[in-house]
Amino acid sequence: MAAIVAAFIVTLLDRYILSLQNEQANVQRQKAQLDLGDVIIHAAYERDRLLTESAAQLRQGGRFERLALAVIARPSQEEMELTTDHARHPLKIYTSPPTEEQQAPPLNQPLFEHVRQVGQKLSTIESPHPGKYPPRFPHQLYLPFAKQGQVRMILGAESYQPIDDQQEDFLTIAGTQLLTALENISLTEQTISLTAQAERNRIAREIHDGVAQLIYILKISTETCVAYTQRLIEASEEDAEMLRPLEDRLKKLILLSKQALWETRSYMFSLKPLNQEHLTLHQMLESQLREFQTISELSTNLHMEGIEINIDGDGERARHLERVHATIFRIVQESLTNAYKHAEATHIDVTLRRQEQSITVEICDNGKGLPEPDPRLGASDQRLYSGHGLQGMKDRLAELEGTLDLLPNGQHGLTIRAWLPLNKGAQG
């Protein structure tokens, strides 16, 4: 009888302890949800801080050994138009530190990719591997969170103990809150970007309708004055000697007005989205040179070698190629400005060489060539005709692992050669 009573008491104690543990776990999860809400409020506009602190709160609240948040970059509207293959957008993983002081095992990233592809929950139990250090946490749970049919975030929990339904529910609720917070951050960023672009477009229109028109009128009026002065010179030899200095001044004023008009147009190019009409690089450069030739009245030629590269279905490479095209356009734009305004060139050749793994553009002018090196300046600060250093061009190219070379163009003139890889990490 005593044994039965003792067993009954032990059972009651076990149930009480289990109930107490469950209650403590519930309290801890509720506190973690409150703390998560506080993190969401205070890190509402800081994505990295939000995800880093949230991972720590979820690990602690769910009593996991480790918790990882994998976020799929949301494609921009431009990227969505380039490709429908959004599975290629990279995963960025935020990990909480493990509970123990020992070295943490590496994350099982292939499982994150698997969940991303199938869009369904994955629960695994990994058998221990003798001699493997550090050992993996055996119980793993991966929960995907989707928006508009696309997986946007994955929560990965790892534990020594089995992950129960309450822990899974806790992660589901918290993950839904986090996904909403991330969507709000994305919408805020899009609103800021659209507002900034709208303001840039407004400024570009103001420049076009205001300053650019005034400079154009000044150019036309000055050309009219030159023509009138020339008629006076032809009509009166007596006045010719007095009027020729005026004619020279007016011609210089015409040149300055053309240069000012081209620079103004360059500022407008910088303010507006570069390729709103989704032109090819060939078409972009043709349009650029056509406008430059119209304004400057200098002769230009565009030479194309190679064929357009097929990037269908490769979203990451398409985005990289868009950046390459934009960089080439800016390099050509700056080179044209330097050659026209400072090199006293009368002809410019632009050559574009497209190969399978790289693109090279060369801008050759017949101007006065490179200035003598300034001993007071370092190599990266040497000036190219104007007061602007070469560092601007080099910085643009360095972002894409490209190179810039300045070469003499025969006895006179300069060749600017920019090389860009089509695959990151390629070498020329």
Image (spheres, rainbow, N blue to C red):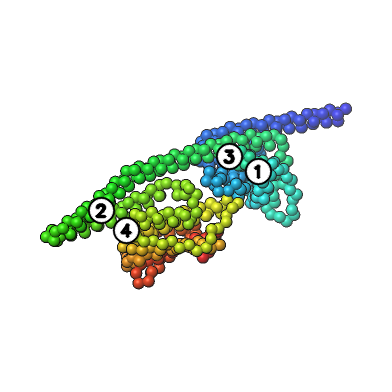
- 358 in relation to 19, above or below: below
Front-most of residues 160 and 231: 231
- Mark 3 or mark 4, which is nearer to you? 4
- Whichever of callouts 3 and 4 sits on the residue coming sooner in the sequence is 3
The residue that mark 3 highlights is: 54
Dot 4 lies on which element? Answer: helix
Q: Is residue 116 left or right of residue 280?
A: right
Circles 2 and 3: CB distance less than 8 Å?
A: no
- 28 in relation to 428, above or below: above
Give residue 336's mark.
none
Crowding at dot 2, Cα within 10 Å, few <14 / some 14-19 / many 20+, comes out as some
Q: Is residue 367 left or right of residue 123?
A: left
- Whichever of callouts 2 and 3 sits on the residue coming sooner in the sequence is 3
Q: Amino acid at mark 2?
A: Glu
- Whichever of callouts 2 and 4 sits on the residue coming sooner in the sequence is 2
Dot 2 lies on which element? Answer: helix
- Whichever of callouts 1 and 2 sits on the residue coming sooner in the sequence is 1
Report the Cα–Cα distance between label 1 and label 2: 72 Å
Q: Position of residue 142 (x, y in %)?
A: 67, 43
- Whichever of callouts 1 and 3 sits on the residue coming sooner in the sequence is 3
